[in-house]
Image (cartoon, rainbow, N blue to C red):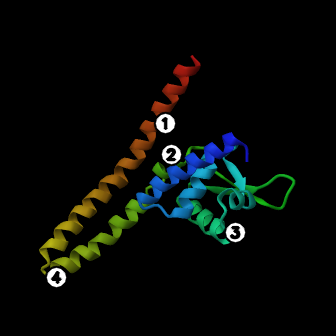
């Protein structure tokens, strides 16, 4: 790998390490950041395997995880039977902002826990579960607006640079 490519991969590894510390799965972090640093934001499984020095199974597991989050998608690789893994057209963080079902799923699950805490007369867990429900409901309702705000901000920045 040329020196510039090595530097990009080193940067990808540093970013992936931060994502891992924040709780993102290690291999998914490494695959995501490697795609971020690739020229076309797309690589085959073999390319990911070679760049990261990991097994095909590790690539597959990481890609499946990222696909579920909407951060990576598969497409056919022209002229080949291989699949290409790529970042979505909108950047990965935009994809995550557009998909708030995670927050809705958590918020939907919490009433059962709240009821159980009430029935057990467990004040500590009850207070934490109520706060958690309020937080995730807040996030679920705010994420679409944050996405729209990001799109408008980004469009204005691009127009300013090009204008």
117 in relation to 40, above or below = below
Q: Label for residue 94?
A: 2
Mark 2 or 3 closer to N-term? 3
- Along the horizontal axis of the image, is 142 left or right of 11? left
Residue 107 in the image: state x and y as whole percent: 33, 65
The residue carrying mark 3 is 56
The residue carrying mark 4 is 119
Residue 43 in the image: state x and y as whole percent: 71, 53
- Along the horizontal axis of the image, is 131 left or right of 66? left
The answer to whether the residue labelled 4 contacts the one labelled 2, judged by CB atoms less than 8 Å apart, is: no
Mark 2: few/some/many CA within 10 Å (<14, 14-19, 20+): some
Q: Report the Cα–Cα distance between label 1 and label 4.
A: 45 Å
Q: Most extreme residue toward the front, as rendered?
A: 3
Q: What element carries label 2?
A: helix
Q: Report the Cα–Cα distance between label 4 and label 3.
A: 48 Å
108 in relation to 115, above or below = above
User: Between tags 4 and 2, which lies in front?
Assistant: 2
**Residue closest to the eye, 129 or 82:** 82
Q: Can residue 80 be seen in this view?
A: yes
**Residue closest to the eye, 83 or 98:** 83
Residue 11 in the image: state x and y as whole percent: 56, 46
Q: In which quarter of the image is residue 46?
A: bottom right
The answer to whether the residue labelled 1 contacts the one labelled 2, judged by CB atoms less than 8 Å apart, is: yes
Mark 4 or 2 closer to N-term? 2
The residue carrying mark 1 is 151
Q: Report the Cα–Cα distance between label 3 and label 1.
A: 36 Å
Mark 4 or 3 closer to N-term? 3
Mark 3 or 1 closer to N-term? 3
Q: Label for residue 8?
A: none
Residue 58 in the image: state x and y as whole percent: 63, 69
Q: Report the Cα–Cα distance between label 1 and label 2.
A: 9 Å
């Amino acid at each position: 790998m040329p020196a510039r490519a090595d530097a990009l991969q080193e940067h990808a590894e540093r970013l992936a390490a931060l994502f891992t510390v924040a709780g993102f799965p290690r291999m998914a972090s490494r695959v995501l950041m490697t795609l971020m640093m690739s020229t076309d934001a797309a690589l085959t499984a073999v390319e990911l395997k070679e760049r990261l020095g990991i097994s095909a199974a590790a690539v597959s597991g990481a890609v499946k995880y990222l696909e579920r989050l909407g951060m990576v998608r598969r497409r056919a690789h022209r002229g080949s039977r291989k699949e290409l893994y790529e970042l979505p057209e909108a950047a990965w963080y935009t994809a995550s902002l557009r998909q708030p079902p995670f927050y809705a799923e958590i918020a939907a699950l919490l009433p059962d826990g709240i009821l159980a805490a009430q029935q057990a007369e467990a004040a500590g867990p009850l207070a934490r579960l109520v706060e958690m429900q309020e937080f995730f409901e807040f996030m679920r309702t705010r994420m679409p607006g944050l996405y729209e705000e990001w799109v408008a901000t980004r469009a204005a920045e691009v127009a300013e640079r090009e204008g």
